Image: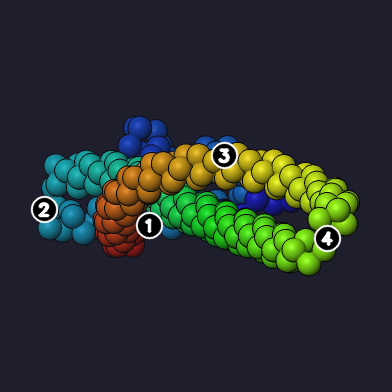
Amino acid sequence: MTEQKITYEQVEKIASNMLTASVKPTVRGVISITGGRTETVSGFLRDFFNKRDAEVSKMESELGSSKIAKLLASEIQLVVDRKTTRLSEIVNRQKLQLAESIELLDEKEVDCQERIKLAEELNIQSVNEITAKLKHISAEVTVVEIAKNKAESEAESLVKSANFQLEKAESENAELREQVKLLTVDVAKFEIKHSQNEQAQKQLDIVKLSIADQNILIARLQTEKTAFTKDNSRLETDLQELKIKAEKLSQVQTQLIEVQKQISQLQHELSLSQRERDSLSQALNAR
């Protein structure tokens, strides 16, 4: 069996507690509590009594050489031992309380740091989301403006083409009139009628094609107009939402200021906690 090592301080403390409890310290009594070899415990206990006797003798010499002085010296030593034991217990209890306070301060410091970090992350996330939405809405507005300009350009080109065809038809009619004047009446009537029929047929075909193209253009323009109307309505809605979001952004900025104030307060509390921990640490070190 492995021998249990003990120290003089352990033996001294146990013997002092026994004397405080009005129990005479013995080698067997000390071994039953601490263990250890008999020779070691006996030597430490002998040193304890020698030290105690020396202190009692010193008190006797200070009080006198009578039996009453010896009894007083012995009682005073018991009182000193009791006080020493109680003070040791108080010091140990205060050390435990200081350690617990330091642990609580450490937990409070970690909690404050986590709250500061969470507030900063929420602030950055809100700003990033609002910035991304603003960029998206700006891009949509740009695309709608480009499409609108393109449609206006196409419509202007179609109007110019229709005007050109009308001028061309009027010019051809004028040329036909001049040719009719040069022909005889009968031939002129026949050729005019035939030419008119052919020209009318061509014009009719051209008009039909033009009407069909114009109908297609009108349908497309109406579709684009409807789409533009929807886009404008959507953009107006988006602009209203953007204004609301801008107001919310102002509120978020206000909340951000409040959060920053809370962060400053938490940092102040953290500084106070660190000061308290340092004070408690210094007090513990002084003990």
Q: Quadrant of residue 156?
A: bottom right
Instruction: Give the mark, 3 or 4, whose residue is nearer the N terminus.
Output: 4
Task: Report the Cα–Cα distance between label 1 and label 4.
Answer: 167 Å
Q: In this orientation, does residue 30 appear?
A: no
Q: Residue at x 76, y 48 (%)?
A: 207
C-beta proximity under 8 Å, tags 3 and 1: no
- Which numbered disc, 1 or 4, marks the residue closer to the eye? 4
Task: Report the Cα–Cα distance between label 3 and label 4.
Answer: 63 Å
Instruction: Give the mark, 4 or 2, whose residue is nearer the N terminus.
Output: 2
Residue type indicated by callout 1: Asn
Query: Is label 4 in a helix, a strand or a loop?
Result: loop
Residue position marked by numbered label 4 in the rendering: 184
Task: Report the Cα–Cα distance between label 3 and label 1.
Answer: 107 Å
Instruction: Give the mark, 1 or 4, whose residue is nearer the N terminus.
Output: 1
Left or right of 214? Residue 80 is: left
Q: Which mark is residue 63?
A: 2
Q: Residue at x 33, y 37 (%)?
A: 20
Would you place residue 173 above or below residue 262 in this image?
A: below
Q: Nearer the viewer, residue 25 or 279?
A: 279
Residue position marked by numbered label 3 in the rendering: 230
Residue type indicated by callout 3: Lys
Instruction: Give the mark, 2 or 1, whose residue is nearer the N terminus.
Output: 1
Query: Is label 1 in a helix, a strand or a loop?
Result: helix
Residue position marked by numbered label 1 in the rendering: 50
